[in-house]
Amino acid sequence: MSKVDFLKKHIKRGQLYKRSELSKWSASVDRHIAELVNEGLLVKVGPGLYHYPKKNAFGNEPPTEQMLVSKFLDDSNFLITSFNVYNRLGLGTTQLYNNHIVYNHHRSGTIKLGNKEFLFRKKRAFPKKVNEEFTFVDLLNNLYELAEDQPQVLNNALNKVPQLNKAELHKVIDKYATPKTRKLLASL
């Protein structure tokens, strides 16, 4: 059995691997990875990140966003969101954004994983799931980045406060609001 075959024996379809993981089974990991990529067995999906895709009726099945981010961070504690969720609040935001924001405890910066760019933002706290109150506070936290008419969106947001769950809103503000957002909402 060749050394590259020994490496092949240890990888499984549908799984993601970091270069460091593959080095456990190969003394010449970079050469062997290059061979497997050239064969089409492995696909490079990020910095030092490789996928052994499953086949389906349409070709190679890509990894999910959750799988990519989890493997990249070596952590399952993160939240993937987008500015597109703000459109659900009914505050006049209609823009569609081609971004995926990852709130996490480890990394900041823009990283391409698979065929998508993820904007990693290091945060001290974020929820496991998004609710209306978190989305509202997150919109105010990121208001300066929106392509919409920001003063109009802010005015609409301030008018929406009475419709939100007060107890949940206070919890979300305490945990996730930036100082600027806290100051803005303190008067209400």
Image (cartoon, rainbow, N blue to C red):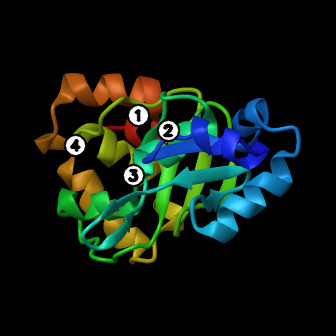
Q: In the depicted view, which residue is nearer to us: 154 or 84?
A: 84
Residue under the image location 31 percent in, 25 percent down:
170
- Looking at this view, name the residue that lies furthest to the left: 163
The residue that mark 4 highlights is 132
Q: How much space separates mark 3 and mark 2, taking CA atoms?
A: 38 Å
Q: How much space separates mark 2 and mark 4, taking CA atoms?
A: 20 Å
Label 2 or label 4, whichever comes before in sequence order: 4
Q: Label for residue 142? A: none
Number of the front mark, 3 or 2: 3
The residue that mark 1 highlights is 186
**Which structural element holds mark 4?**
helix
The residue that mark 3 highlights is 64
Q: How much space separates mark 1 and mark 4, taking CA atoms?
A: 19 Å
Looking at the rendered structure, the kind of residue marked 3 is Thr
Residue 87: image x %, image y %? 25, 65
Question: 178 above or below 32?
Answer: above
